[in-house]
Amino acid sequence: MSTPTTSSRRILLIDDHGIVRHGIGVLLSAAKDLEVCGEAGTYDEALEALRTLKPDAAVVDLILHDRSGLELIRTARAEGITLPMLVLSMHDESTHAEKALRAGAQGYVMKEDADEVLVDALRKVLAGGMYVSGDINARMLRTYIAGDEEAGDSGVDQLTDREKEIFECLGRGLTTRKIAEKFGLSARTVEVHRARIKKKIGAEDAAQLLREAVKWVEMRDL
């Protein structure tokens, strides 16, 4: 942990690996304006630390021992905890950054880039700004200009509620027969739904449909 100064900002580290928290602490120790005020490795520990330590900002991993970092951020925002939260994750920024920002984070840094950008990213969010890489920033701007809320869902927003239920079941590995039994449908009806889903999300074949379903489920579970 860095030595506190009268002007240093207090940072809470939330990651399920102690060695990662240690590494971040060492990195921040070189910044005279930042100090680590606490650490947490689980959802419950993190929520309690946010409530009691009242840090100036938090660095949050997407994956914790018991729940996801996104769920933690949403809960904190629902409780009125407004401090800046910067996601630090091994997951590809291109598929997870926008999801993190929608959950209430102020920025996203990949762990492989932490040595170079974490301190600057923290300073930026502490100053009231947002931080993502230049590539993601440009993509989000293009999306905004186009008025397009595609945001990586691959057309899933076009599906009906029943189609989304079946798409989720596909992503969780259920067969047509299991899906039919789950919803009280005939196998033929499920196949019709599958065909409509495949067309709406632009899948070329059944294999791509399954890959997209698995990816969508994984992103929802984060």
Image: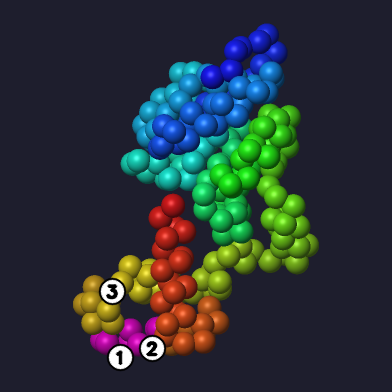
In the rendered image, residue 22, in percent from the top left (x then y), is placed at 48, 28
Which residue matches tag 1?
A: 188
Q: Nearer the viewer, mark 2 or mark 3?
A: 3
Q: Which is more toward the observer, 84 or 122? A: 122
> From what the image shows, is residue 100 above or below residue 32?
below
Within 10 Å of disc 2 (Cα), the crowding (few <14, some 14-19, many 20+) is: few
In the rendered image, residue 29, in percent from the top left (x then y), is placed at 61, 22
Q: Secondary structure at mark 3?
A: loop
Q: Which residues are magenta?
A: 183-194
Residue 180 visible here: no
Which residue matches tag 2?
A: 192
Q: Is residue 42 left or right of residue 38?
A: left
Q: Is residue 71 left or right of residue 89?
A: left
Say which mark, if any, is on residue 174. 3
The answer to whether mark 2 and mark 1 are in CB contact below 8 A is yes
**Residue name at image x 56 percent, y 44 percent:** 111
**Residue name at image x 64 percent, y 64 percent:** 149
Q: Which residue type does callout 2 highlight? A: Val
Q: CA distance from mark 2 to mark 3?
A: 16 Å
Q: Secondary structure at mark 2?
A: helix
> From what the image shows, is residue 122 above or below residue 187?
above
The answer to whether mark 2 and mark 3 are in CB contact below 8 A is no
Q: CA distance from mark 1 to mark 3?
A: 15 Å
Residue 202 magenta = no
Q: Which residue type does callout 1 highlight? A: Arg
Q: CA distance from mark 2 to mark 1?
A: 6 Å
Which quarter of the rendering shows the N terminus? top right
The answer to whether mark 1 and mark 3 are in CB contact below 8 A is no
